[in-house]
Amino acid sequence: MLNGPTVSLNLLPKSDEAEKVILGAMLLEPDHIVPMVEGMIEASDFYHRAHRKIYRTIMELFYAGRAADLVGVADHLSDAEGLEQVGGRLYLNSLLDAITTVESVPYYAQIIRAKSWRRRLIEAGGRMTELGYHSDGDITKTQETAMSIVNEAILEKGIEDEIHPLADLEKEYLERLKAEKRAGRPESYLTTGFETLDRRIPDLTGQFMVVAGSSSIGKSLFMLNMAYKQAKKGIRVGFLSLEMLEIALLDRLLENHAGITDERRKFTPMEDLSKKAGEILRLPIWTVALGTSSLFGILRQMRQLVLRDEVRCIYIDYLQLIGDVISSQRVGELEDICRHALLFAKKYKVGVVIGSQFSREAMTTADKRPELWMLRGSGGIENAADVVIGLFRPEYADKTKSSGIMEIHWLKNRNGRRNIMDRMSCNLELQRIEDLAGERSEEEEEPITTLVGEKMQKKIMKGGAE
Protein backbone atom coordinates (compact mmCIF):
# COMPACT_ATOMS: atom_id res chain seq x y z
CA MET A 1 0.00 0.00 0.00
CA LEU A 2 1.35 3.41 -0.95
CA ASN A 3 1.94 5.97 1.75
CA GLY A 4 1.52 9.72 1.39
CA PRO A 5 4.69 11.85 1.10
CA THR A 6 6.24 13.14 4.29
CA VAL A 7 8.05 16.47 4.38
CA SER A 8 10.49 17.43 7.11
CA LEU A 9 9.93 20.91 8.46
CA ASN A 10 13.68 21.53 8.03
CA LEU A 11 13.25 21.06 4.28
CA LEU A 12 10.46 23.58 3.81
CA PRO A 13 11.40 26.33 1.32
CA LYS A 14 12.76 29.43 3.05
CA SER A 15 15.46 32.06 2.65
CA ASP A 16 16.96 33.39 5.87
CA GLU A 17 19.12 35.80 3.88
CA ALA A 18 16.21 37.36 1.98
CA GLU A 19 14.15 37.79 5.15
CA LYS A 20 17.06 39.49 6.94
CA VAL A 21 17.79 41.78 3.98
CA ILE A 22 14.19 42.99 3.80
CA LEU A 23 13.85 43.57 7.55
CA GLY A 24 17.25 45.27 7.75
CA ALA A 25 16.36 47.65 4.92
CA MET A 26 13.00 48.44 6.52
CA LEU A 27 14.66 49.20 9.87
CA LEU A 28 17.27 51.43 8.19
CA GLU A 29 14.97 53.42 5.85
CA PRO A 30 11.32 52.72 6.76
CA ASP A 31 9.95 55.79 4.93
CA HIS A 32 11.46 54.58 1.66
CA ILE A 33 11.30 50.78 1.98
CA VAL A 34 7.87 50.21 3.60
CA PRO A 35 5.86 51.62 0.64
CA MET A 36 8.10 49.59 -1.68
CA VAL A 37 7.40 46.18 -0.09
CA GLU A 38 3.85 46.80 1.19
CA GLY A 39 1.54 44.88 -1.08
CA MET A 40 4.34 42.58 -2.28
CA ILE A 41 4.69 40.60 0.95
CA GLU A 42 2.83 40.20 4.23
CA ALA A 43 3.86 39.08 7.69
CA SER A 44 2.61 35.56 6.99
CA ASP A 45 5.10 35.26 4.10
CA PHE A 46 8.06 35.16 6.51
CA TYR A 47 9.18 31.70 7.60
CA HIS A 48 10.54 32.63 11.04
CA ARG A 49 8.08 33.66 13.72
CA ALA A 50 10.44 36.36 15.02
CA HIS A 51 10.69 37.86 11.54
CA ARG A 52 6.88 37.92 11.24
CA LYS A 53 6.67 39.81 14.54
CA ILE A 54 9.34 42.34 13.50
CA TYR A 55 7.60 42.95 10.15
CA ARG A 56 4.20 43.47 11.80
CA THR A 57 5.73 45.88 14.31
CA ILE A 58 7.39 47.97 11.59
CA MET A 59 4.15 48.20 9.61
CA GLU A 60 2.10 49.04 12.71
CA LEU A 61 4.44 51.86 13.74
CA PHE A 62 4.79 53.19 10.20
CA TYR A 63 1.05 53.56 9.60
CA ALA A 64 0.55 54.99 13.09
CA GLY A 65 2.94 57.80 12.11
CA ARG A 66 5.53 56.75 14.69
CA ALA A 67 9.26 55.98 14.31
CA ALA A 68 9.53 52.61 12.57
CA ASP A 69 13.33 52.48 12.46
CA LEU A 70 15.67 50.33 14.57
CA VAL A 71 15.34 52.47 17.70
CA GLY A 72 11.58 52.86 17.40
CA VAL A 73 10.95 49.14 16.85
CA ALA A 74 13.27 48.12 19.70
CA ASP A 75 11.59 50.54 22.11
CA HIS A 76 8.09 49.43 21.07
CA LEU A 77 8.92 45.74 21.46
CA SER A 78 10.58 46.43 24.79
CA ASP A 79 7.46 48.22 26.07
CA ALA A 80 5.28 45.37 24.79
CA GLU A 81 7.56 42.77 26.41
CA GLY A 82 8.21 41.26 23.00
CA LEU A 83 11.84 42.21 22.48
CA GLU A 84 13.26 38.91 23.76
CA GLN A 85 10.84 36.98 21.52
CA VAL A 86 12.62 38.37 18.46
CA GLY A 87 16.15 37.80 19.78
CA GLY A 88 16.74 41.08 21.62
CA ARG A 89 18.46 44.30 20.55
CA LEU A 90 21.57 42.47 19.38
CA TYR A 91 19.56 40.49 16.83
CA LEU A 92 17.78 43.62 15.57
CA ASN A 93 21.18 45.30 15.13
CA SER A 94 22.48 42.25 13.24
CA LEU A 95 19.72 42.68 10.64
CA LEU A 96 21.37 45.92 9.49
CA ASP A 97 24.48 43.94 8.59
CA ALA A 98 22.48 41.87 6.08
CA ILE A 99 21.60 44.86 3.89
CA THR A 100 23.00 44.84 0.35
CA THR A 101 21.53 47.69 -1.73
CA VAL A 102 18.14 49.37 -1.75
CA GLU A 103 17.75 48.45 -5.43
CA SER A 104 17.83 44.76 -4.48
CA VAL A 105 14.86 45.00 -2.08
CA PRO A 106 12.17 44.07 -4.68
CA TYR A 107 14.30 41.09 -5.75
CA TYR A 108 14.51 39.75 -2.19
CA ALA A 109 10.83 40.46 -1.60
CA GLN A 110 10.03 38.27 -4.60
CA ILE A 111 12.18 35.50 -3.12
CA ILE A 112 10.27 35.65 0.18
CA ARG A 113 6.95 35.60 -1.63
CA ALA A 114 7.98 32.66 -3.83
CA LYS A 115 9.20 30.64 -0.83
CA SER A 116 5.97 31.38 1.02
CA TRP A 117 3.90 30.26 -1.98
CA ARG A 118 5.86 27.02 -2.23
CA ARG A 119 5.29 26.29 1.47
CA ARG A 120 1.55 26.78 0.97
CA LEU A 121 1.71 24.50 -2.04
CA ILE A 122 3.45 21.79 -0.01
CA GLU A 123 0.85 22.14 2.74
CA ALA A 124 -1.92 21.92 0.15
CA GLY A 125 -0.29 18.80 -1.31
CA GLY A 126 -0.35 17.15 2.10
CA ARG A 127 -4.02 18.03 2.53
CA MET A 128 -4.82 16.71 -0.95
CA THR A 129 -3.02 13.45 -0.15
CA GLU A 130 -4.96 13.13 3.09
CA LEU A 131 -8.18 13.83 1.21
CA GLY A 132 -7.37 11.13 -1.33
CA TYR A 133 -6.83 8.49 1.37
CA HIS A 134 -9.67 9.37 3.71
CA SER A 135 -12.50 11.01 1.71
CA ASP A 136 -15.90 9.31 1.70
CA GLY A 137 -17.82 8.13 -1.35
CA ASP A 138 -19.37 11.51 -2.17
CA ILE A 139 -17.29 12.40 -5.25
CA THR A 140 -18.95 15.82 -5.72
CA LYS A 141 -18.18 16.88 -2.16
CA THR A 142 -14.60 15.60 -2.51
CA GLN A 143 -14.10 17.54 -5.74
CA GLU A 144 -15.38 20.75 -4.12
CA THR A 145 -13.04 20.27 -1.15
CA ALA A 146 -10.10 19.62 -3.48
CA MET A 147 -10.84 22.76 -5.51
CA SER A 148 -11.08 24.76 -2.29
CA ILE A 149 -7.64 23.51 -1.20
CA VAL A 150 -6.13 24.42 -4.59
CA ASN A 151 -7.70 27.90 -4.58
CA GLU A 152 -6.46 28.63 -1.07
CA ALA A 153 -2.94 27.56 -1.99
CA ILE A 154 -2.72 29.43 -5.28
CA LEU A 155 -4.88 32.49 -4.77
CA GLU A 156 -4.96 33.37 -1.09
CA LYS A 157 -2.25 35.06 0.91
CA GLY A 158 -2.12 33.83 4.47
CA ILE A 159 -4.21 35.59 7.07
CA GLU A 160 -3.10 35.02 10.64
CA ASP A 161 -6.35 34.88 12.57
CA GLU A 162 -6.70 35.57 16.27
CA ILE A 163 -8.22 32.54 17.98
CA HIS A 164 -10.06 33.19 21.23
CA PRO A 165 -13.04 31.83 23.19
CA LEU A 166 -16.38 33.62 23.07
CA ALA A 167 -15.87 34.63 26.71
CA ASP A 168 -13.19 37.07 25.54
CA LEU A 169 -15.90 39.01 23.69
CA GLU A 170 -18.12 39.39 26.76
CA LYS A 171 -17.30 43.00 27.61
CA GLU A 172 -17.45 44.25 24.01
CA TYR A 173 -20.68 42.42 23.25
CA LEU A 174 -22.52 43.51 26.41
CA GLU A 175 -21.51 47.13 25.80
CA ARG A 176 -22.87 46.80 22.28
CA LEU A 177 -26.21 45.48 23.59
CA LYS A 178 -26.43 48.29 26.16
CA ALA A 179 -25.76 50.90 23.48
CA GLU A 180 -28.54 49.45 21.33
CA LYS A 181 -30.96 49.73 24.24
CA ARG A 182 -29.99 53.33 24.94
CA ALA A 183 -29.82 54.82 21.48
CA GLY A 184 -31.10 52.21 19.04
CA ARG A 185 -27.83 52.33 17.10
CA PRO A 186 -24.39 52.37 18.80
CA GLU A 187 -22.02 55.10 17.61
CA SER A 188 -19.51 52.43 16.64
CA TYR A 189 -21.90 51.13 13.97
CA LEU A 190 -21.02 52.02 10.38
CA THR A 191 -24.11 53.65 8.90
CA THR A 192 -24.76 53.76 5.14
CA GLY A 193 -25.87 57.40 5.40
CA PHE A 194 -29.41 56.58 4.21
CA GLU A 195 -32.30 55.64 6.51
CA THR A 196 -33.73 53.49 3.72
CA LEU A 197 -30.60 51.32 3.65
CA ASP A 198 -29.95 51.44 7.40
CA ARG A 199 -33.29 49.72 8.02
CA ARG A 200 -31.95 46.74 6.07
CA ILE A 201 -28.26 46.90 7.11
CA PRO A 202 -27.90 47.82 10.80
CA ASP A 203 -24.09 47.92 10.62
CA LEU A 204 -21.90 47.94 7.50
CA THR A 205 -18.75 47.09 9.51
CA GLY A 206 -17.05 43.99 8.08
CA GLN A 207 -19.62 43.73 5.29
CA PHE A 208 -18.99 43.20 1.59
CA MET A 209 -21.75 44.85 -0.44
CA VAL A 210 -22.35 44.69 -4.18
CA VAL A 211 -24.27 47.50 -5.92
CA ALA A 212 -25.41 45.96 -9.21
CA GLY A 213 -27.20 47.29 -12.25
CA SER A 214 -27.23 47.58 -16.00
CA SER A 215 -24.96 49.99 -17.83
CA SER A 216 -25.70 53.68 -17.06
CA ILE A 217 -28.38 52.83 -14.48
CA GLY A 218 -26.58 54.89 -11.82
CA LYS A 219 -24.20 52.61 -9.90
CA SER A 220 -21.43 55.22 -9.62
CA LEU A 221 -24.02 57.84 -8.73
CA PHE A 222 -25.48 55.66 -5.99
CA MET A 223 -22.13 54.73 -4.43
CA LEU A 224 -20.81 58.30 -4.54
CA ASN A 225 -23.98 59.48 -2.79
CA MET A 226 -23.49 56.85 -0.09
CA ALA A 227 -19.89 57.99 0.39
CA TYR A 228 -21.00 61.65 0.49
CA LYS A 229 -23.72 60.96 3.09
CA GLN A 230 -21.30 59.01 5.27
CA ALA A 231 -18.64 61.73 5.02
CA LYS A 232 -21.17 64.37 6.10
CA LYS A 233 -21.69 62.30 9.25
CA GLY A 234 -17.93 62.34 9.89
CA ILE A 235 -17.23 58.82 8.63
CA ARG A 236 -13.89 58.52 6.81
CA VAL A 237 -14.44 56.93 3.39
CA GLY A 238 -12.34 56.01 0.37
CA PHE A 239 -13.54 56.04 -3.24
CA LEU A 240 -11.43 54.07 -5.75
CA SER A 241 -12.43 54.65 -9.34
CA LEU A 242 -11.16 52.79 -12.38
CA GLU A 243 -13.55 54.74 -14.59
CA MET A 244 -13.43 58.42 -13.60
CA LEU A 245 -10.69 60.91 -12.80
CA GLU A 246 -10.67 62.53 -9.36
CA ILE A 247 -11.71 65.88 -10.86
CA ALA A 248 -14.81 64.24 -12.37
CA LEU A 249 -15.70 62.82 -8.95
CA LEU A 250 -15.36 66.29 -7.44
CA ASP A 251 -17.62 67.75 -10.14
CA ARG A 252 -20.33 65.25 -9.24
CA LEU A 253 -19.96 65.93 -5.53
CA LEU A 254 -20.18 69.69 -6.14
CA GLU A 255 -23.37 69.35 -8.18
CA ASN A 256 -24.94 67.31 -5.38
CA HIS A 257 -23.71 69.48 -2.51
CA ALA A 258 -24.36 72.89 -4.08
CA GLY A 259 -27.61 71.89 -5.78
CA ILE A 260 -26.56 73.30 -9.15
CA THR A 261 -26.40 71.56 -12.49
CA ASP A 262 -23.36 71.55 -14.72
CA GLU A 263 -25.04 74.14 -16.97
CA ARG A 264 -25.99 76.48 -14.09
CA ARG A 265 -22.48 76.30 -12.67
CA LYS A 266 -21.25 78.44 -15.59
CA PHE A 267 -23.46 81.32 -14.39
CA THR A 268 -22.83 80.91 -10.63
CA PRO A 269 -20.56 83.54 -9.01
CA MET A 270 -17.07 82.27 -8.30
CA GLU A 271 -17.37 83.31 -4.66
CA ASP A 272 -20.33 80.95 -4.18
CA LEU A 273 -18.59 78.14 -6.06
CA SER A 274 -15.44 78.55 -3.96
CA LYS A 275 -17.43 78.36 -0.73
CA LYS A 276 -19.27 75.19 -1.75
CA ALA A 277 -16.12 73.60 -3.19
CA GLY A 278 -14.30 74.33 0.06
CA GLU A 279 -17.01 72.53 2.01
CA ILE A 280 -16.64 69.50 -0.26
CA LEU A 281 -12.85 69.48 -0.04
CA ARG A 282 -13.00 69.42 3.76
CA LEU A 283 -15.10 66.26 3.86
CA PRO A 284 -13.24 63.11 5.04
CA ILE A 285 -13.22 61.51 1.58
CA TRP A 286 -10.10 60.00 0.01
CA THR A 287 -10.40 59.64 -3.77
CA VAL A 288 -8.09 57.44 -5.80
CA ALA A 289 -8.11 57.44 -9.59
CA LEU A 290 -6.48 54.04 -9.95
CA GLY A 291 -3.57 53.68 -12.33
CA THR A 292 -3.70 49.90 -12.07
CA SER A 293 -6.40 47.30 -12.57
CA SER A 294 -4.36 44.63 -10.77
CA LEU A 295 -6.20 43.03 -7.85
CA PHE A 296 -3.16 43.09 -5.60
CA GLY A 297 -2.41 46.68 -6.56
CA ILE A 298 -5.94 47.65 -5.54
CA LEU A 299 -5.66 45.69 -2.29
CA ARG A 300 -2.46 47.62 -1.54
CA GLN A 301 -4.31 50.94 -2.01
CA MET A 302 -7.11 49.65 0.22
CA ARG A 303 -4.69 48.68 2.98
CA GLN A 304 -3.09 52.13 2.86
CA LEU A 305 -6.50 53.79 3.15
CA VAL A 306 -7.38 51.70 6.20
CA LEU A 307 -4.03 51.61 8.01
CA ARG A 308 -2.72 55.07 7.17
CA ASP A 309 -5.88 57.17 6.76
CA GLU A 310 -8.20 55.20 9.10
CA VAL A 311 -10.89 54.90 6.44
CA ARG A 312 -13.93 52.88 7.59
CA CYS A 313 -15.68 52.27 4.27
CA ILE A 314 -14.16 51.73 0.80
CA TYR A 315 -15.97 52.02 -2.54
CA ILE A 316 -14.65 50.50 -5.76
CA ASP A 317 -16.09 51.53 -9.12
CA TYR A 318 -16.37 48.93 -10.55
CA LEU A 319 -15.85 45.12 -10.45
CA GLN A 320 -15.61 44.28 -14.15
CA LEU A 321 -12.76 46.77 -14.66
CA ILE A 322 -10.52 44.94 -12.16
CA GLY A 323 -7.98 42.43 -13.47
CA ASP A 324 -6.69 41.51 -16.90
CA VAL A 325 -7.32 37.78 -17.26
CA ILE A 326 -8.39 36.47 -20.68
CA SER A 327 -12.13 36.01 -21.17
CA SER A 328 -12.09 32.21 -20.86
CA GLN A 329 -10.94 32.57 -17.24
CA ARG A 330 -12.83 35.77 -16.44
CA VAL A 331 -15.63 34.26 -14.34
CA GLY A 332 -13.12 32.58 -12.03
CA GLU A 333 -11.19 35.83 -11.65
CA LEU A 334 -14.33 37.77 -10.71
CA GLU A 335 -15.08 35.16 -8.05
CA ASP A 336 -11.52 35.52 -6.74
CA ILE A 337 -11.81 39.33 -6.59
CA CYS A 338 -15.04 39.09 -4.60
CA ARG A 339 -13.54 36.57 -2.21
CA HIS A 340 -10.59 38.89 -1.54
CA ALA A 341 -12.99 41.82 -0.99
CA LEU A 342 -14.95 39.77 1.56
CA LEU A 343 -11.79 38.68 3.39
CA PHE A 344 -10.52 42.28 3.42
CA ALA A 345 -13.77 43.57 4.96
CA LYS A 346 -13.69 40.90 7.68
CA LYS A 347 -9.97 41.22 8.40
CA TYR A 348 -9.87 45.02 8.72
CA LYS A 349 -13.46 45.42 10.02
CA VAL A 350 -14.45 47.95 7.36
CA GLY A 351 -17.23 48.18 4.82
CA VAL A 352 -16.33 47.31 1.22
CA VAL A 353 -18.80 48.35 -1.50
CA ILE A 354 -18.21 47.35 -5.13
CA GLY A 355 -20.24 48.26 -8.18
CA SER A 356 -21.01 45.46 -10.63
CA GLN A 357 -22.46 45.34 -14.13
CA PHE A 358 -25.40 43.15 -15.03
CA SER A 359 -25.03 40.89 -18.05
CA ARG A 360 -26.36 41.99 -21.43
CA GLU A 361 -29.09 39.37 -21.11
CA ALA A 362 -30.63 41.53 -18.37
CA MET A 363 -31.97 43.88 -21.05
CA THR A 364 -33.83 41.06 -22.80
CA THR A 365 -36.29 40.43 -19.94
CA ALA A 366 -39.84 41.76 -20.00
CA ASP A 367 -39.55 44.57 -17.42
CA LYS A 368 -35.73 44.53 -17.01
CA ARG A 369 -35.93 44.64 -13.21
CA PRO A 370 -32.93 43.20 -11.31
CA GLU A 371 -32.49 39.52 -10.47
CA LEU A 372 -29.45 37.69 -9.11
CA TRP A 373 -28.85 35.69 -12.27
CA MET A 374 -28.18 38.92 -14.14
CA LEU A 375 -24.82 39.32 -12.38
CA ARG A 376 -21.89 38.33 -14.53
CA GLY A 377 -20.42 35.23 -12.89
CA SER A 378 -23.28 35.48 -10.41
CA GLY A 379 -22.43 32.29 -8.49
CA GLY A 380 -19.10 33.53 -7.14
CA ILE A 381 -20.26 37.13 -6.63
CA GLU A 382 -23.45 36.06 -4.88
CA ASN A 383 -21.67 33.58 -2.60
CA ALA A 384 -19.03 36.09 -1.45
CA ALA A 385 -21.27 39.12 -0.93
CA ASP A 386 -23.04 39.82 2.35
CA VAL A 387 -25.42 42.18 0.55
CA VAL A 388 -26.41 42.48 -3.11
CA ILE A 389 -28.73 45.29 -4.19
CA GLY A 390 -29.95 45.75 -7.73
CA LEU A 391 -30.67 49.28 -9.00
CA PHE A 392 -33.45 50.13 -11.42
CA ARG A 393 -35.09 53.28 -12.78
CA PRO A 394 -38.52 52.88 -14.47
CA GLU A 395 -37.52 55.17 -17.35
CA TYR A 396 -34.69 52.76 -18.14
CA ALA A 397 -37.26 50.29 -19.50
CA ASP A 398 -39.69 52.91 -20.82
CA LYS A 399 -38.00 56.00 -22.27
CA THR A 400 -41.30 57.93 -22.17
CA LYS A 401 -41.32 57.89 -18.36
CA SER A 402 -39.54 60.33 -16.10
CA SER A 403 -40.18 59.04 -12.60
CA GLY A 404 -37.33 60.53 -10.56
CA ILE A 405 -37.27 57.23 -8.67
CA MET A 406 -34.45 54.77 -8.00
CA GLU A 407 -35.69 51.31 -7.07
CA ILE A 408 -33.50 49.35 -4.62
CA HIS A 409 -34.05 45.61 -5.05
CA TRP A 410 -32.64 43.56 -2.17
CA LEU A 411 -31.39 40.48 -4.00
CA LYS A 412 -29.34 39.14 -1.08
CA ASN A 413 -29.01 40.29 2.51
CA ARG A 414 -27.31 38.31 5.25
CA ASN A 415 -28.51 40.96 7.71
CA GLY A 416 -32.21 40.51 7.08
CA ARG A 417 -34.90 40.07 4.47
CA ARG A 418 -34.38 39.76 0.74
CA ASN A 419 -36.68 39.91 -2.30
CA ILE A 420 -38.11 43.23 -1.17
CA MET A 421 -37.87 46.57 -2.89
CA ASP A 422 -37.38 50.13 -1.58
CA ARG A 423 -37.78 53.38 -3.48
CA MET A 424 -35.50 56.41 -3.25
CA SER A 425 -35.49 59.82 -4.93
CA CYS A 426 -33.12 60.13 -7.91
CA ASN A 427 -32.19 63.46 -9.50
CA LEU A 428 -29.73 62.82 -12.33
CA GLU A 429 -29.22 66.52 -13.10
CA LEU A 430 -28.03 67.22 -9.55
CA GLN A 431 -26.32 63.82 -9.18
CA ARG A 432 -28.40 63.30 -6.05
CA ILE A 433 -30.00 60.29 -4.33
CA GLU A 434 -32.24 60.89 -1.30
CA ASP A 435 -34.53 59.01 1.08
CA LEU A 436 -38.23 59.31 0.30
CA ALA A 437 -40.23 60.50 3.32
CA GLY A 438 -42.71 57.88 4.52
CA GLU A 439 -41.66 55.41 1.83
CA ARG A 440 -42.34 51.75 2.58
CA SER A 441 -40.85 48.72 0.92
CA GLU A 442 -42.73 46.53 -1.51
CA GLU A 443 -42.46 42.84 -0.81
CA GLU A 444 -41.78 40.82 -3.92
CA GLU A 445 -42.60 37.16 -4.33
CA GLU A 446 -39.74 34.67 -3.99
CA PRO A 447 -38.63 33.71 -7.53
CA ILE A 448 -39.81 30.24 -8.49
CA THR A 449 -37.57 28.08 -10.62
CA THR A 450 -38.75 27.32 -14.11
CA LEU A 451 -38.35 23.63 -13.32
CA VAL A 452 -41.38 23.77 -11.02
CA GLY A 453 -44.60 22.83 -12.78
CA GLU A 454 -47.72 25.02 -12.85
CA LYS A 455 -49.56 22.88 -10.28
CA MET A 456 -46.67 22.99 -7.83
CA GLN A 457 -46.27 26.71 -8.47
CA LYS A 458 -49.92 27.37 -7.55
CA LYS A 459 -49.50 25.20 -4.45
CA ILE A 460 -46.49 27.19 -3.34
CA MET A 461 -48.27 30.50 -3.88
CA LYS A 462 -51.13 29.26 -1.67
CA GLY A 463 -48.71 28.28 1.09
CA GLY A 464 -49.22 24.59 0.58
CA ALA A 465 -45.53 23.75 0.19
CA GLU A 466 -42.18 25.15 1.11
Image: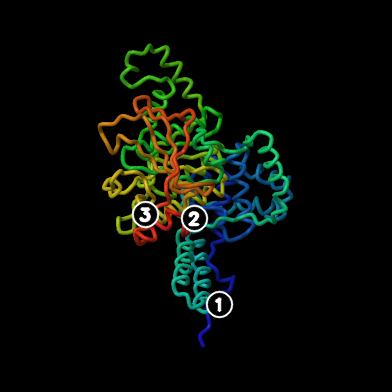
Q: Disc 1 and disc 3: Cα gap in Å?
A: 39 Å
Numbered mark located on residue 108 in the image? 2
Q: Where is residue 226 in the image (x, y as percent from the top left)?
A: 47, 34
Numbered mark located on residue 377 in the image? 3
Q: Where is residue 435 in the image (x, y as percent from the top left)?
A: 47, 30
Residue toward you, 354 or 26: 354
The local crowd at label 1, few if under 14, some if 14 to 19, many if 20 or more residues have their Cα within 10 Å, is: few
Q: Where is residue 236 in the image (x, y as percent from the top left)?
A: 54, 33
Residue toward you, 125 or 130: 130
Residue 125 visible from this viewpoint: yes
Q: Which of marks 1 and 3 is in front?
A: 3
Residue toward you, 19 or 181: 181
Q: Disc 2 and disc 3: Cα gap in Å?
A: 37 Å
Numbered mark located on residue 6 in the image? 1
The local crowd at label 2, few if under 14, some if 14 to 19, many if 20 or more residues have their Cα within 10 Å, is: some
SS for dot 3 = loop
| Amino acid type, label 2 | Tyr
Question: Tags 1 and 3 in contact by the CB under 8 Å rule?
Answer: no
| Amino acid type, label 1 | Thr
Q: Disc 2 and disc 1: Cα gap in Å?
A: 29 Å
| Amino acid type, label 3 | Gly
